[in-house]
């Protein structure tokens, strides 16, 4: 869990990164025109072979520094992302809705519309690539928002193509109690083999 | 307004292209961000626009030539009535998907103020050029800009 101090820590870290990157950038920058003209010719400097070895060692060192910096930036980005989510969606008000598709022989998903307490919060259109990912077992976080403690109702409308390639639209709803912790709900699309129809359900992850 | 003036007035140039997901007339949905790495051309049209038909045909020719180089073209209808847009799209024989934006959400995001309007997006998803009309001159300019983006 991040607190105010960790926010400062992240900022200090970012500042350190920038400071660390400055000399590196200077080292990588081409020499100024004046410097280039005042440099002695290559023939007058030290023997060529040791200089080449030294240069390759320098390059290796620089490369390692660049890789280290890249890793630090990725780590920082991850920490800032987590921090942003915790600030925007604190655990005591957070509600997340996930979507999972199992099999999908009787329903080709096109869109999902979500309403919480009769207010539309998302209308999501699925591309063939996303549907493929869901069919491979992916779980999508469809919605992340905030709700106050108490009773709420979630209604989901699923649109797509049903059996025999016909337009198909179904709804599912759930009444849930939002407590002081984060609330996670899952929309699940399943095939009901016995009826040769798709099945839509909403589960509350306790 | 001259083409050059129009170009400078379009403030999405050099900005990240607004992402969208739209229904296609032929079925399915298209999301712009799934086409990173390709040069994307968006052509906004309306069924009541006389020059749009000629422009869509010109875009189709460019797609046939440059598809293998990484070009994707999408026509975006701004018609209020999707059925009218779908009828128009079916009557225009083009090989690229025609998308429906009856709510004009994408049209607003791309600041469409004239039809046809063509937006060129580079491989990194940045808006690079806009053409606000269709003529032999703008078609030449389009091909020139398109080749430059494909060569990057």
Image (cartoon, rainbow, N blue to C red):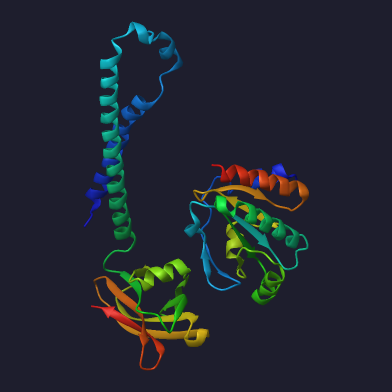
In the depicted view, which residue is nearer to us: A60 or B116? A60
Indicate the position of residue A171 as horizontal and vertical percent values. 43, 85
Residue A167 visible within the image: no
Image quarter of residue A53: top left
Whether residue B104 is situated above or below residue B129 in the rendered picture:
below
Image quarter of residue A25: top left
Answer left or right for B83 relative to A179: right
Indicate the position of residue A56 as horizontal and vertical percent values. 28, 25
Residue B136 visible within the image: yes
Q: How many marks?
A: 0
Q: Quadrant of the N terminus of chain A?
A: bottom left
Whether residue A99 is situated above or below residue B135 in the rendered picture:
below
Answer left or right for A57 relative to A99: left
Indicate the position of residue A161 as horizontal and vertical percent values. 49, 81
Name the residue at the top extreme: A44
Whether residue B120 is situated above or below residue B56 in the rendered picture:
above
In the depicted view, which residue is nearer to us: B22 or A90? B22
Q: Residue at x 41, y 8 (%)?
A: A38
Q: Residue at x 33, y 71 (%)?
A: A137
Answer left or right for A143 relative to B5: left
In the depicted view, which residue is nearer to us: B65 or B83? B65
Indicate the position of residue A78 as horizontal and vertical percent values. 29, 52
Name the residue at the bottom extreme: A195
Image quarter of residue B56: bottom right
């Amino acid at each position: 869990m991040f607190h105010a101090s960790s926010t400062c820590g992240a900022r200090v870290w970012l500042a350190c990164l920038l400071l660390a990157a400055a000399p590196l950038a200077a080292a990588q920058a081409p020499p100024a025109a004046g410097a280039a003209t005042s440099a002695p010719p290559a023939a007058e400097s030290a023997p060529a072979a040791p200089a080449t070895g030294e240069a390759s060692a320098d390059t290796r060192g620089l490369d390692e520094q660049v890789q280290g910096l890249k890793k630090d930036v990725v780590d920082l980005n991850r920490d800032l992302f987590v921090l942003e989510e915790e600030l925007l969606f604190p655990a005591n008000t957070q509600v997340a809705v996930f979507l999972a598709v199992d099999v999908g022989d009787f329903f080709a998903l096109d869109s999902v519309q979500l309403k919480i307490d009769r207010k539309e919060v998302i209308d999501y259109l699925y591309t063939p690539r996303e549907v493929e990912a869901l069919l491979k077992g992916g779980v999508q976080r469809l919605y992340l928002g905030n709700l106050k403690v108490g009773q709420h109702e979630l209604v989901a409308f699923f649109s797509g193509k049903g059996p025999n390639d016909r337009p198909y639209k179904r709804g599912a709803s759930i009444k849930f109690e939002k407590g002081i912790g984060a609330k996670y709900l899952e929309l699940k699309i399943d095939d009901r083999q016995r009826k040769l129809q798709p099945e839509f359900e909403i589960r509350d992850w306790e | 307004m001259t083409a050059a003036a129009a170009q400078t007035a379009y403030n999405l140039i050099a900005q990240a292209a607004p992402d969208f997901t739209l229904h296609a007339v032929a079925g399915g949905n298209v999301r712009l961000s799934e086409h990173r790495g390709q040069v994307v051309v968006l052509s906004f049209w309306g069924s009541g626009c006389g020059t749009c038909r000629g422009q869509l045909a010109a875009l189709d020719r460019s797609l046939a030539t440059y598809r293998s180089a990484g070009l994707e073209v999408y026509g975006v209808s701004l018609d209020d009535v999707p059925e009218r847009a779908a009828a128009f799209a079916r009557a225009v024989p083009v090989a690229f998907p025609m998308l429906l934006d009856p709510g004009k959400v994408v049209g607003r995001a791309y600041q469409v103020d004239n039809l046809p309007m063509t937006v060129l997006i580079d491989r990194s998803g940045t808006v690079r050029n806009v053409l606000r009309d269709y003529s032999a001159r703008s078609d030449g300019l389009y091909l020139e800009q398109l080749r430059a983006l494909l060569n990057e």
